[in-house]
Structure formats: C-alpha cells, structure tokens
Amino acid sequence: MSKTVEQLERELAQSNEDFEQVAGIAERRFLSSLAFRAFLGKKGLTEEFEKYEKQFSENIQDYLNGDIEI
C-alpha cells in the first residue's frame, strides 16, 4: 500500500514533534540531575548516589540486552 506525500509529511511532522518532546524531557531531567548532584555533594552523599547510579545503569543495560525482564 503506497502512502501519499501528505501522509508521509504528516508522519514526519509527528515524528519531529515526538522527538522534540523527548529531547525536552531529557534536557529537563539532565538539569534536574545536575541540581540533585549538587545537593548530594553538599550533604556528603555523592559516593552513595554514584553506587546507586552505577547499579541502575547496569540493570538498564541488562534489560536492554534481554538478560532480565520487568
């Protein structure tokens, strides 16, 4: 089934909107993460957070590799 140019343009526009939404969320989360790290540093909790962050990253990678299921 062939798509019309208009359909393809709509799909591309939607994809661009979706990407911009995701990029905005990622940017806000990154800035929140920086602020959170600064807060933890002031409280002396940076090392504990880094251990948690490392474990979380490993769990995500295991999930993406199909080694674990949620």
Image (spheres, rainbow, N blue to C red):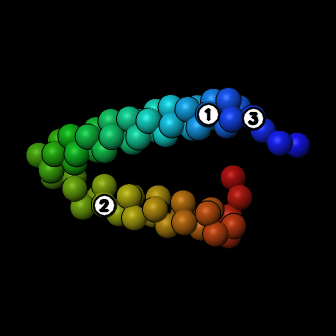
Which residue has dot 1 on it?
A: 9
Taking the image as shown, residue 60 lies to the left or right of residue 25, namely right
Q: Nearer the viewer, mark 1 or mark 2?
A: 1
Taking the image as shown, residue 62 lies to the left or right of residue 31, namely right
Which quadrant is home to the N terminus? top right
* Residue 45 visible in the displayed image: yes
Q: Quadrant of residue 15?
A: top right
The amino acid at mark 2 is: Glu
The amino acid at mark 3 is: Thr
Residue found at the very far front of the displayed protein:
5
Residue at 46%, 62% in the rendered image: 57
Which residue has dot 3 on it?
A: 4
Residue at 59%, 38% in the rendered image: 12
Sooner in the amino-acid sequence: mark 2 or mark 3: 3
Which residue has dot 2 on it?
A: 50
- Assign a secondary structure to mark 3: loop
Task: Out of 68 and 16, give the one closest to the viewer.
Answer: 16
* Residue 36 visible in the displayed image: no
Taking the image as shown, residue 63 lies to the left or right of residue 31, namely right
The residues bearing labels 2 and 3 have C-alpha atoms spaced at a distance of: 50 Å
- Assign a secondary structure to mark 2: helix
